[in-house]
Image (spheres, rainbow, N blue to C red):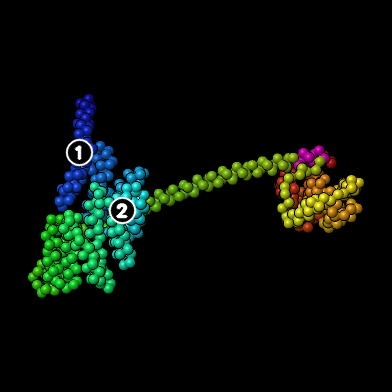
Amino acid sequence: MVKKIFTLIFLLGFVSCIYSQITEQEIFKKIQKSSEYNKTENRDKALKLLIEAKSDSKKINYKSGLLNCNEGLMTMYVFAHDYKKVIEIAKESEKILISTPDVERLAHVYMNRGIAYLGLGFMNEALEDFKSSIKYNNESKNNDIKHDQLSNVYQNMASYYEIKQKPDSIIYFLKRSIEESKQVNDSSKLYGSSKYDNIIFTNLNIASYYTGVSKPQRLDLAERYFNEVLKYKDTDNFKANSVIFYNNFARFYNEKKDYNKAVEYATIALSKIMKAQSASQKQITYETLYKAYDKLGNKEMKIKYLELYTQLSDSLRSLEKSSINYSNSQIIEEKKKNFKEDQKKTWLMIAVIIMILIIVFGIIWMKHIKKTKARYETIIENFKKNEDIPVLAESADNEEEQTEEKTIDADKNNNVEIPEASIQSILTCLDAFEKTNEFTNANVSLSYLANYANTNTKYLNEVLKNYKGKSFSRYINGLRINYIMKVLYNEPKYREYKITYLAELCGFSSRQVFTTVFKKETGITTSYYINQLKNESFIPDEI
């Protein structure tokens, strides 16, 4: 047992020593070397070095190295049409980058994944990723990176609209790509060179569009853009896209029916493709050659390139089909997973909101119950002391009362002067009126009460306002509510009567008006008051 422990410790120490020998600098050198291999079109070695560098980065948790490797690998797998791997790597990088401010890398990830989705036919996913790439590129503070990457994204947007068969959008985005590239600073160490690569490539795309896609075909416009490319023929920038250039020029001459020229340029392209090992470009060249030889009547060469074209097309279709099948199921599963996660988050959020609303409503309701209970107890205490219900300080809230109070205010502004003897007489009459319970008569009006008090309506209003603190309507309503509450308090049998009857008993014309005024005057509802009296089985002292 002890030997096993020592062996395990030794192995762990040995592995640790191996890992400790891996440095960030060594990883960086591998990435640089891989880039050099890629430039010389030795992509097998470039790919092998990047995979090693990525593995080393994971071992020492070197995130920057891992992301650099992923960028290189995505570019290479896009070139090789291995879209399954592009999507896998993009998701790995996205998880690392999504919570960081590295918008340039994140934009690059979305662009590459968009290309992969486009290649697999997932149009909506491709468009969303291209839009995300544009969004994050526009957030970049480095203008050279922003313009360079936007140029690339717009090229791919053009490819998207080519599949969607929207000619105007294709040309629009290709031209935007050129404009973005032109804004890159020539002195930029990283992007000054790729600026012209992009300009050449995009001009080729436009020329190719007018040659083989545009309906009607516009060879005159195609030639104009090919001439734009020719301006850079003797530069190093041209060499990066020379295979594509020769292929496009060969196809152009095929369309112009200059088949010898088509063979000449396709043959040059083929000699360069053999070094680059680009299957898609080989496919284009074989197609151009067999069509050109067919028109020239060279049957032997036609059959040769037709067979090569057919074999390569079958091989590419087989690879693409397996990639699509795998990626399709993977994407569907991920969509289901994301949908379930989104559903969980949504339901959790809804549950939290509902809980908050319940708590808030509960607090408000408890305060309301407490306030209502306190108001009820105050009313009962006043009745025990043989006092009227305490007045609530509320503003008039119905049209009739507002009109009355405006009239009173207007009279007050007119400085109505009432003799003191008249005031005392009116108050005495009002006291007598309150004791007679005549206010329960539904026909009681301001004029009626003025006659009762041997005065005019103007004087009566002024006295009510200044000595009772109420308008006529509120004065009468207050008396009626106070009366019916005392009746309910003193005589339990009335608690069993319908509210409509109680309303009529105290002088209200309808149940609705009665309950509204009751709540306004007392702060509690009629039903609450009656139910509380019932629940307490209150038998009051005689008032």
Which element is circle 2 on?
A: helix
Instruction: Say whether residue 435 is visible.
Output: no
Question: In this picture, is 309 found above or below 326?
Answer: below
**Residue tagged by mark 1?**
26
**Residue tagged by mark 2?**
147
Q: Nearer the viewer, mark 2 or mark 1?
A: 2
Q: Quadrant of the C terminus?
A: top right
Question: In this picture, is 466 found above or below 451?
Answer: above
Relative to the observer, which residue lies in front, 296 or 194? 194
**Circle 1: residue type:** Glu
Q: Position of residue 444 (x, y in %)?
A: 84, 56
**Circle 2: residue type:** His
Q: Position of residue 508 (x, y in %)?
A: 79, 55
Q: Position of residue 26 (x, y in %)?
A: 20, 38
Q: In the figure, residue 220 lies in which quadrant?
A: bottom left
Look at the magenta stretch and give its main secondary structure: helix
| Lateral position of residue 483 relative to residue 157, left or right | right
Q: Mark 1, residues whose alpha carbon is within 10 Å: few (<14), some, or many (≥20)?
A: few
Q: Alpha-carbon distance for marks 2 and 1?
A: 31 Å
Relative to the observer, which residue lies in front, 273 or 4? 273
What residue is shown at x 61% (from left), y 44% (from top)?
Answer: 364
Instruction: Say whether residue 365 is visible.
Output: yes
**Mark nearer the N terminus (2 vs 1):** 1
Q: Mark 2, residues whose alpha carbon is within 10 Å: few (<14), some, or many (≥20)?
A: many
**Region in magenta:** 379-386
